[in-house]
Image (cartoon, rainbow, N blue to C red):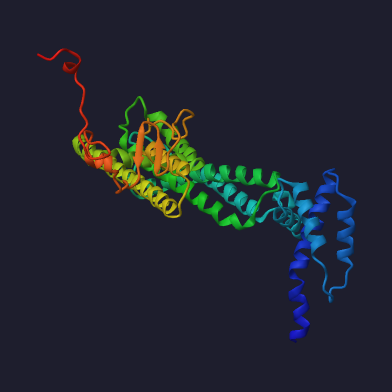
């Protein structure tokens, strides 16, 4: 039992890749796109290869990659699904080659029929009083709510059918996204119902706008169902407007902004300190390893330039040459540890000679005659 099912399991990937390659080749040839003969030869050899023997998948994968680029923007999954649906449901091909399209078309037809049926009832007209959840009840309110739901369903199904049709035309339809289309349809119906029930309740009906509301409420439900995202943005703006009433005073908002700016500045200062500390540590390591004074001078210049943006660069062309134990920087002289050996002349002072006798200092009075 295990030995008989093992080859079938091992050939699943091979069959999938080969099936997608065949479908893409048929699509490319039917569309008049040039298909490399080597690709067709590889697929034919793979089709008639023994199924119970291992096969080198590298040529088939390369052929799959070439065909995928050739049929782009169409995707292999979409071509396989569309071809399989068309072959399986030939009698329903007139209603669409995708099951989602057929189901969505059925829902759209149902919404249209429901809308037409409910429009025949006199209770769906606005009459002397606007039909809202506040002013109406019972059967008239139920009929009007179903009327609005049917209008919203027409708008939502219209938008989704158009979107699905675009994906089918470009051969990029993916059946794994089918639940998202039904979610969008439900959101459109809900959006149409909300706008049809909430907005007329806030409008006072009189003789001047009675006829406009009679036509505008179903139209509003249909437009809201067509674009549920627009209704979402409207509701979001309403919520933000209500929240703005309970927000902090301008002074408190200013204090919060200042605190946020101070926190950001403190964070930037901490990051700059860490950066400078890292540069100093690297420089200490260079000093410990006996680095060249010119390299140390350049490193110090980089630290100063990071601390003071207006500082002159360390590698100025007219910078003086550094002496031993001295690091030369522009307008800066950093001396190493001073030499403890002091010459006898310097220790004796400026008025001492080599043999310890004081040296007479000439003054301007010595040049003249003494009295």
Front position in the image: 360 or 191: 360
Q: Residue at x 19, y 37 (%)?
A: 249
Q: Where's residue 48, x and y in %?
A: 89, 67
Q: Nearer the viewer, residue 29 or 155?
A: 29
174 lies above or below 327: below
Residue 241, above or below 59: above
Residue at horizontal 78%, vertical 56%? 64
Please determine whether, in this image, residue 241 is positioned above or below residue 6. above
Q: Image check: 52 left or right of 344?
A: right
- Closer to the camera, 246 or 67? 67
Query: Looking at this rendering, what residue extends furthest in the bottom direction?
Result: 1
Considering the image in quadrants, where does the C terminus appear? Answer: top left
| Quarter of the view holding residue 159 | top right
User: In which quarter of the view is residue 326 placed?
Assistant: top left
Residue at x 75% of width, y 80% of height: 6
The answer to whether residue 38 shows anywhere in this view is yes
Residue 227: where, in percent of width, then height? 49, 40
The location of residue 247, given as percent across then percent down, is: 23, 41
Q: In the rendered image of this protein, does residue 210 appear above or below residue 293?
A: above
Q: Quadrant of residue 242?
A: top left
Taking 337 as reference, is 181 left or right?
right
Q: Is 18 situated left or right of 259 in this image?
A: right
Which residue is painted at 77% across and 67% down in the image?
A: 14
Using residue 160 as the reference point, say whether residue 354 is left or right of it. left
For residue 122, say whether it is visible. Answer: no
Q: Residue furthest left?
A: 371
Residue 166 x/y as whole percent: 65, 43
Image quadrant where one finds the N terminus = bottom right
């Amino acid at each position: 039992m295990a030995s008989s099912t093992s080859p079938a399991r091992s050939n699943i990937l091979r069959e999938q890749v080969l099936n997608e390659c065949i479908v893409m080749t048929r699509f490319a040839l039917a569309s008049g796109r040039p298909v490399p003969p080597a690709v067709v030869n590889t697929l034919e050899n793979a089709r008639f290869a023994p199924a119970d023997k291992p096969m080198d998948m590298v040529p088939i994968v390369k052929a799959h990659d070439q065909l995928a680029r050739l049929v782009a923007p169409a995707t292999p999954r979409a071509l396989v699904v569309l071809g399989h649906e068309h072959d399986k449901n030939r009698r329903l091909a007139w209603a669409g080659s995708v099951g989602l399209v057929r189901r969505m078309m059925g829902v759209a037809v149902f919404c249209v029929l429901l809308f037409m049926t409910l429009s025949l009832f006199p209770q769906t007209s606005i009459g002397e009083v606007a039909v809202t959840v506040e002013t109406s009840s019972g059967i008239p309110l139920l009929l009007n709510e179903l009327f609005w739901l049917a209008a919203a369903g027409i708008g939502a199904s219209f938008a989704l059918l158009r979107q699905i049709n675009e994906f089918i035309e470009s051969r990029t339809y993916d059946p794994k996204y089918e639940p998202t289309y039904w979610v969008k349809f439900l959101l459109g119906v809900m959006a149409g119902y909300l706008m049809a029930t909430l907005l007329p309740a806030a409008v006072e009906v009189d003789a001047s706008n009675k006829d406009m509301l009679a036509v505008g409420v179903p139209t509003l439900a249909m437009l809201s169902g067509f674009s549920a995202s627009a209704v979402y943005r409207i509701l979001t703006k309403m919520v933000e407007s209500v929240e703005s009433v309970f927000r902090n005073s301008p002074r408190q908002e200013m204090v919060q902004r200042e605190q946020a700016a101070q926190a950001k500045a403190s964070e930037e200062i901490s990051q700059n300190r860490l950066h400078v500390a890292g540069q100093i540590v690297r420089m200490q390591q260079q000093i410990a390893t006996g680095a060249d004074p010119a390299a140390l001078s350049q490193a110090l210049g980089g630290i100063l330039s990071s601390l003071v943006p207006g500082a002159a660069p360390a590698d100025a062309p007219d910078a003086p040459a550094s002496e031993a134990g001295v690091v030369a920087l522009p307008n800066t002289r950093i001396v190493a540890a001073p030499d403890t050996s002091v010459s006898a002349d310097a220790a004796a002072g400026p008025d001492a000679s080599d043999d310890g006798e004081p040296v007479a200092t000439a003054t301007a009075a010595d040049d003249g005659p003494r009295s």
